[in-house]
Amino acid sequence: MSRLDSFIRRMEAQREILNSVSKSIHALPGPVLEVGLGNGRTYSHLRELMPEREIFVFDRAVNAHPSSIPEDKYLFLGEVEETLASCGDRITEPAALIHSDIGIGDDQGNIEIAKWLSPLVEERTAVGGIVVCNMELNLSGFNELPLPEGIKPGRYFVYQKS
């Protein structure tokens, strides 16, 4: 499969999962955390899916399209490991949804990221909240949810805090 086809399938999977989980958390209070702004496509989609929710974004630097950059009060810049750990003074309630797409395409590198990301996600997710991630996480007290039909296992991971 070409890299272009792989990218398209990954984006279609991401959209399908986010569309699905946004419905399942409709009645659950709490913000959305977008871990990895990138060029802002997913952030833009989350704003359309959940316009009533606060969406907080974490990334090292802003490289997004101008229409996909959150207001400063919703943006945490710096090393995600540090900003996600120290955001409690600005984000006072657990997240209904955390979406993370900060994997680096290297299995060993993703394992290292998952080691520090997993406990931070555990701490920041509301009971009943959903975590969508492009890498497998080791989350205590979470159930892995099935992927929507047609999405290749291992492309994304979806968890719910019990």
Image (spheres, rainbow, N blue to C red):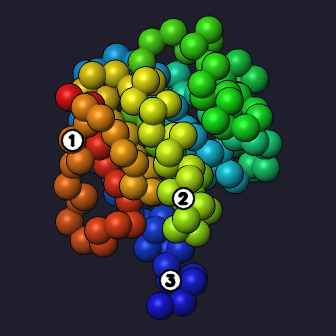
Task: Please provide percent x and percent y for residue 86.
Answer: 64, 19
Can the viewer see residue 23 in this picture?
Answer: no
The kind of residue tagged 1 is Asn
The residue closer to the viewer here, 14 or 49, is 14
The residue closer to the viewer here, 91 or 144, is 144
Residue at 62 percent across and 45 percent down: it is: 36
**Residue marked by disc 3:** 5
- Density class for disc 1 (Cα within 10 Å; few <14, some 14-19, many ≥20) is few
The residue closer to the viewer here, 96 or 15, is 96
Task: Please provide percent x and percent y for residue 18.
Answer: 38, 48
Residue at 39 percent across and 30 percent down: it is: 122
Image quadrant holding the C terminus, namely top left
**Residue marked by disc 1:** 143
How many marks are shown on the rendered structure? 3
Residue at 75 percent across and 23 percent down: it is: 72
Mark closer to the observer (3, 2): 2
Mark closer to the observer (3, 1): 1
Cα gap from disc 3 to disc 1, whole angstroms? 30 Å
Cα gap from disc 1 to disc 2, whole angstroms? 20 Å
Can the viewer see residue 6 in this picture?
Answer: yes
Residue at 67 percent across and 28 percent down: it is: 83
Where disc 2 sits, the SS reads: helix
Going from N to C along the chain, the mark reached first, 3 or 2, is 3
Mark closer to the observer (1, 2): 2
Do the CB atoms of the residues marked 1 and 2 lie less than 8 Å apart? Answer: no
Where disc 3 sits, the SS reads: helix
Horizontally, is 6 left or right of 78 in the view? left
- Density class for disc 2 (Cα within 10 Å; few <14, some 14-19, many ≥20) is some
- Density class for disc 3 (Cα within 10 Å; few <14, some 14-19, many ≥20) is few
The kind of residue tagged 3 is Asp
Q: In this view, does 133 lie above or below 26?
A: below
